[in-house]
Image (spheres, helix red, strand yellow):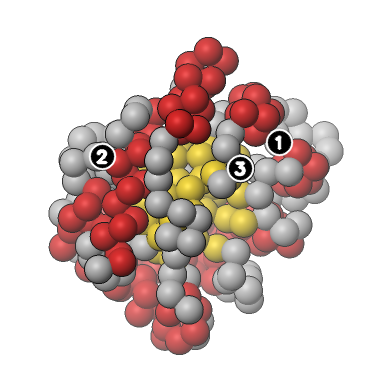
């Protein structure tokens, strides 16, 4: 089974009701490759999920940007995985570097979240990635392996997991990884999955790239053999997100 191209749009903490509706209109009017070719998932802030869900075309799906790591209850300000299930939200982004860095989420905590979300039937976009200091000191693979291990040692079924490799230095900076840099880490992660989990999981798990992806650089990145799609931040709020979705066709050749 080939790995279906995956394009996620992470809207982060942006938007008003009007702006969100405008983005959805643009997406709904777009001509994009069919669902057989590309899986498209957009991730609005929690408060806009119901309005986006009510308006969004049926071939695009929704992801939350986070959820609590256990059953809901007395956890002020949190959103539980149960609530996402209740709302019919199929996907959740977990372990984004903004949460790891700004909110001190540890790899273990992220691993717990992934495990709990999967146990409720949610699909997970699990983010990993190194800082600039870590890259410059030559320990990129080690960092992403530790982050991936905290997930791998807690789960056995990888069919609902997409790994997003997002170098911290490339996120929101306009400084995209080169296709060769992305391919090197993606291939390294796939080898890690092969050696530590199984050949089957390594072959079937999608590893997507995130960090300053835009309409101009997406095709070359999509051409890399181990790049199975993208997680897009800034450009997912703009019409060029459509061009990024269309880069899925690169894989057909
Ligand atoms: P960016 O963000 O595309 O704005 O760099 C990517 C992400 O954080 O998922």
Q: Residue 193: x percent and y percent?
A: 44, 77
Q: Residue 220: x percent and y percent?
A: 18, 55
Task: Judge the density around disc 3: few (<14), some (14-19), many (≥20) Cα neighbours within 10 Å.
Answer: few
Is disc 1 placed on a helix, strand or loop?
Answer: loop
Ligand 1 under 8 Å from disc 2 Cβ: yes
Q: Would residue 13 appear left or right of 134 to someone viewing this image?
A: right
Residue at horizontal 48%, vertical 48%?
40
Q: Residue 19: x percent and y percent?
A: 48, 16
**Which disc, if any, is residue 89?**
none
Which sits earlier in the primary sequence, circle 2 or circle 3?
3
Read off the residue under disc 3.
Answer: 58
Is disc 2 placed on a helix, strand or loop?
Answer: loop
Which sits earlier in the primary sequence, circle 1 or circle 2?
1
**Which disc, if any, is residue 214?**
2
Measured Cα–Cα span from mark 1 to mark 2: 30 Å
Measured Cα–Cα span from mark 1 to mark 3: 24 Å
Which residue occupies the extreme right position in the image? Answer: 73
């Amino acid at each position: 089974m080939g790995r279906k191209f995956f394009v996620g749009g992470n809207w982060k903490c942006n938007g008003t009701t009007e702006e969100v509706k405008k983005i959805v209109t643009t997406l709904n009017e777009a001509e994009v490759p069919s669902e057989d070719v590309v899986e498209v998932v957009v991730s609005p802030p929690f408060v806009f999920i119901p309005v986006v869900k009510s308006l969004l075309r049926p071939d695009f799906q929704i992801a939350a940007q986070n959820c609590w790591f256990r059953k809901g209850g007395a956890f002020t300000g949190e959103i539980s995985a149960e609530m996402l299930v209740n709302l019919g939200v199929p996907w959740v982004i977990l372990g984004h570097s903004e949460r790891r860095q700004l909110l001190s989420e540890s790899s273990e905590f992220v691993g717990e979240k992934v495990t709990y979300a999967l146990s409720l039937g949610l699909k997970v976009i699990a983010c990993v990635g190194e800082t600039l200091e870590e890259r410059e000191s030559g320990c990129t693979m080690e960092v992403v392996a530790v982050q991936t291990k905290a997930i791998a040692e807690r789960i056995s079924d990888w069919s609902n997991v997409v790994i997003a490799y997002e170098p911290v230095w490339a996120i929101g900076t306009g400084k995209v990884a080169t296709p060769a840099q992305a391919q090197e880490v993606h291939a390294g992660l796939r080898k890690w999955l092969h050696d530590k989990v199984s050949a089957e999981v390594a072959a079937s798990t999608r590893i997507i790239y995130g960090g300053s992806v835009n309409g101009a650089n997406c095709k070359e990145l999509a051409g890399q053999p181990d790049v199975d799609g993208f997680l897009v931040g800034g450009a997912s709020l703009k019409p060029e997100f459509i061009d990024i979705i269309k880069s899925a066709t690169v894989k057909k050749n």
